[in-house]
Amino acid sequence: MMAWSAKFSEPIVLPDGDKLATLQEAGAFVTKLPKTLHDTAPWQNAMHVLIQAADHDGPIEFARLGMMQALFPKGEPTYRSANKDPVWRNSRKLVRDR
């Protein structure tokens, strides 16, 4: 069983420049978040993978990735409708359509 003192392969650098080097530091960081932020899906996932790594011998790299995804979320995916496709997609006809 891996312990909470296990270190990440690379420390997680926080937006303010501080670093999280162990599972315990990352767990403490998550638990100190405001409740509204702590209860969001990315942070719940981060805490889940931290617990899996520390208490159930899960991959420590997944814990690091979960923290990184919660700290630096990507924007929501945007989908374009078919009638807004770029012109180049509709400019060529396939041989079967000629």
Image (spheres, grey):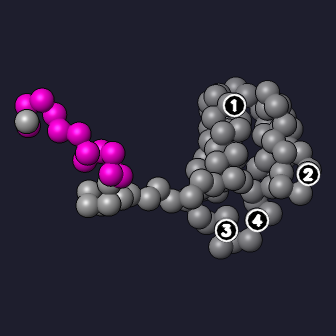
Badge 1 marks a residue whose secondary structure is helix
Q: Estimate the spatial distance between the alpha carbons at disc 4 and disc 3, rounded to whole Å.
A: 6 Å
Q: Amino acid at mark 2?
A: Gly
Image position of 70 with respect to 61: above or below:
below
Mark whose residue sits in front, 2 or 4: 2
Q: Residue drawn at (63%, 54%), measured in percent from left and top?
A: 73
Q: Amino acid at mark 4?
A: Leu
Mark 4 or mark 2, which is nearer the start of the sequence? 2
Q: Residue drawn at (67%, 68%), measured in percent from left and top?
A: 37
Q: Is residue 6 visible?
A: no
Q: Position of residue 93 (x, y in %)?
A: 17, 38
Q: Position of residue 91 (x, y in %)?
A: 26, 45
Mark 1 or mark 4, which is nearer the start of the sequence? 4
Q: Is residue 4 left or right of residue 39?
A: right
Residue 68 found in image quarter:
top right
Mark 1 or mark 3, which is nearer the start of the sequence? 3
Task: Report which residue position mark 3 lands on.
Answer: 37
Q: Is residue 27 left or right of residue 56?
A: right
Q: Amino acid at mark 1?
A: Ile
Q: Position of residue 33 (x, y in %)?
A: 76, 65
Range of residues picked out in magenta: 86-97
Q: Is residue 11 left or right of residue 84?
A: right
Badge 3 marks a residue whose secondary structure is helix
Task: Report which residue position mark 1 lands on.
Answer: 60
Q: Residue drawn at (74%, 71%), measured in percent from left and top?
A: 34
Mark whose residue sits in front, 1 or 2: 2
Task: Report which residue position mark 2 lands on.
Answer: 17
Mark 2 or mark 1, which is nearer the start of the sequence? 2
* Mark 3 and mark 2 residues within 8 Å of each other at the beta carbon: no
* Mark 4 and mark 3 residues within 8 Å of each other at the beta carbon: yes
Task: Report which residue position mark 4 lands on.
Answer: 33
Q: Amino acid at mark 3?
A: Leu
